Amino acid sequence: MSNNKQSSVEWLVEILGKYNEEMVFLYQNEIEQAKAMHKEEIMNAHTIGYVIGGGNGYIHEPEQYYNETYGGNNEQQ
């Protein structure tokens, strides 16, 4: 994953894939759902931090923050 931060879900999938690539393939739908949930959690945490912090030093839009921090695009992360 380039120089962007790796999410915990991506890390787990990478580790599990080293042990059993077939399992990762079989559970691809569940993995994608976990990635979407993780992305939503990150964006929600950013929003809460923005509100609590009064907007100081934060990128205002959660999607923009996620994309700039994790190199997000709409397929994953």
Image: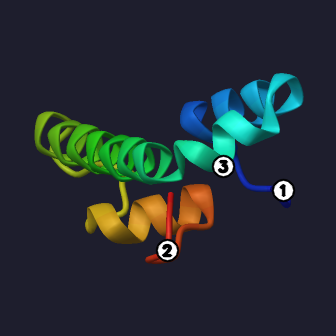
List x then y, in percent, for residue 1. Answer: 81, 56
**Pointer 1 residue:** 3
Q: Which disc is residue 69 wearing?
A: none
User: Up-down: is 43 above or below 13?
Assistant: below
N-terminal label among 1 and 3: 1
Q: Name the one closer to the observer, 60 or 71.
A: 71
Amino acid found under the numbered disc labelled 1: Asn
Give me the C-alpha separation between circle 3 and circle 2. 17 Å
Q: Which residue is at 53% across, 51% downward?
A: 28
List x then y, in percent, for residue 32. Answer: 45, 53
Mark 2 is surrounded, within 10 Å at the Cα level, by few (under 14), some (14 to 19) or many (20 or more) other residues, namely: few
Q: Which residue is at 41% across, 43% downward?
A: 30
Q: Which disc is residue 75 wearing?
A: 2
Q: Which residue is at 27% across, 68% downward?
A: 61
Left or right side of 66 for 53: left
List x then y, in percent, for residue 22. Answer: 74, 40
Closer mark to the observer between disc 1 and disc 2: 2
List x then y, in percent, for residue 27. Answer: 52, 42
Q: Which residue is at 66% across, 49% downward?
A: 25
Mark 1 is surrounded, within 10 Å at the Cα level, by few (under 14), some (14 to 19) or many (20 or more) other residues, namely: few
Amino acid found under the numbered disc labelled 2: Glu
**Pointer 3 residue:** 25
Give me the C-alpha separation between circle 1 and circle 3. 25 Å
N-terminal label among 3 and 2: 3
